[in-house]
C-alpha cells in the first residue's frame, strides 16, 4: 500500500520473515515497524536502546508521561503503553495526513494513553516549560536529516525545561553526531549513549541513541548486553566538537 501524505509518500510493506510485522516507509526510508501481534516488539535497534534508557528512568509498570517529538507510526509510544499501562503520551507529528492515517493503519492506543498532535516539534517543546514530562523522545527527520532547529543548544534547553527534575531526554542521532552530542553535554549533567561499537567508531553507518538527564543514570550494562545485536553503553563521554546554536533571525 502506498499513499501520498502532506510532506511525501508513505508505503507499508509486510516483513517477509515476520508476517505480523508492518514496516512504514516514508519517502523510501524505513520509519516505523509495528507488530500486530506484539505491541512491545521493537524491530529497530535504536528503539530497543531507547526502551532500555526509558525503563532505567521509569521502570515497567510505573506511571509515565512521555512527549514524542516526531510521531510517524508511533511504534515506541505503542510499546510504552503496553509496558506502562498508566502512561499518558503525546506524539507530535508535522505531517497532517500522516498523523491522521496512522490510526487507520495501525492499532494504536487511544487518548488519553496516546494523543497525536499536528505541529512543529520545536514550537511544541518550547511551550512545555514546567510541564514535568518524565520522558521526551526526539526522533524527527525530514528528507533523512534532523531539522536543524531541533539539534541546537537552545532546543536542548527547551527540552530540559519541559522535563521533570529526574526526567530524561532520548535522542536519535545519525551521521555527524559529534556536534550534537557536545550540544547535549553542554546542557545536561549526565549524558550516555548506546550503539553498535562499529557505528561509534565510524566503521559502519547507523543510529546512536543518546540519553540526557540532570539526574545520574543507573547501571544498564546488563540490559545492553542482553540485546539481540551488538551494542555498548558509553558513559565516560568527552565532547569533541563545539555545541550547535540557533541561527540568529
Image: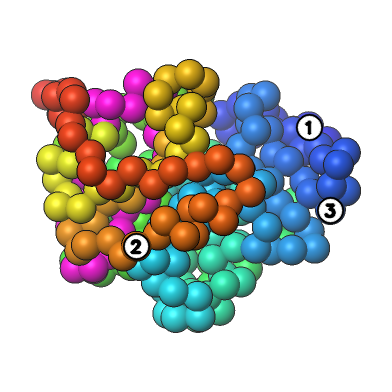
In front: label 1 or label 2:
2
Compared across the picture, whether 66 is left or right of 11 comes to left
User: Which element type, helix, strand or loop, lies under badge 3?
Assistant: strand
Q: Is residue 37 left or right of residue 118?
A: right
Q: Give the residue at mark 3.
A: 20
As drawn, is 102 to the left or to the right of 111? right
Give the Cα distance between marks 1 and 3. 18 Å
Relative to 169, residue 197 above or below: above
Q: Earlier in the sequence, mark 3 or mark 2?
A: 3
Q: Which residue was labeled with disc 2?
A: 219
Q: Residue 22 placed where, x, y %?
A: 77, 46
Which circle's residue, 1 or 3, is located before the other in the chain? Answer: 1
Tell me the quarter of the image containing the C terminus.
Answer: top left
Residue 169, how many percent across, how many down?
Answer: 31, 53
- Residue 13 seen by the camera: yes
- Picture residue at 26% right of the left edge, 34% below the top: 181
**Image mark for residue 172:** none
Label 1: few (<14), some (14–19) or many (≥20) C-alpha neighbours in 10 Å: few
Rendered location of residue 85, percent (x, y): 56, 79
- Which label belongs to residue 2? 1
Question: Which region is colored magenta?
Answer: 155-180
Camera-near label (1 vs 3) is 3
Could you tell me which residue is drawn at 13 percent across and 40 percent down?
186
Is residue 164 in the magenta section?
yes
Amino acid at each position: 500500500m502506498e499513499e501520498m501524505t502532506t510532506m511525501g509518500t508513505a508505503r507499508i510493506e509486510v516483513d517477509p520473515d515476520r508476517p505480523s510485522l508492518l514496516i512504514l516507509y516514508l519517502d523510501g526510508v524505513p520509519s516505523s515497524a509495528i507488530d500486530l501481534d506484539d505491541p512491545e516488539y521493537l524491530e529497530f535497534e535504536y528503539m530497543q536502546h531507547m526502551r532500555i534508557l526509558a525503563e532505567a528512568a521509569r521502570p515497567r509498570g510505573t506511571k509515565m508521561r512521555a512527549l514524542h517529538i516526531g510521531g510517524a507510526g508511533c511504534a515506541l509510544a505503542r510499546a510504552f503503553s503496553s509496558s506502562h499501562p498508566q502512561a499518558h503520551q503525546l506524539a507530535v507529528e508535522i505531517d497532517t495526513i500522516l498523523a491522521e492515517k496512522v490510526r487507520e493503519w495501525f492499532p494504536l492506543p487511544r487518548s488519553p494513553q496516546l494523543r497525536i498532535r499536528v505541529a512543529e516539534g520545536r514550537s511544541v517543546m518550547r511551550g512545555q516549560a514546567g510541564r514535568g514530562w518524565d520522558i521526551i523522545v526526539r526522533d524527527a527527520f525530514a528528507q533523512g536529516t534532523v531539522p536543524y532547529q531541533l539539534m541546537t543548544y537552545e532546543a536542548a534547553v527547551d527540552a530540559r525545561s519541559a522535563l521533570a527534575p529526574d526526567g530524561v531526554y532520548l535522542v536519535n542521532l545519525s551521521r555527524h553526531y559529534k556536534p550534537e552530542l557536545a550540544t547535549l553535554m553542554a546542557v545536561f549533567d549526565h549524558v550516555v549513549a548506546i550503539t553498535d561499537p562499529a557505528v561509534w567508531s565510524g566503521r559502519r553507518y547507523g543510529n546512536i541513541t543518546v540519553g540526557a538527564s540532570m539526574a545520574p543514570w543507573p547501571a544498564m550494562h546488563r540490559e545492553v548486553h542482553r540485546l539481540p545485536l551488538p551494542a555498548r553503553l558509553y558513559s565516560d563521554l568527552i565532547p569533541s566538537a563545539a555545541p550547535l546554536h540557533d541561527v540568529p533571525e
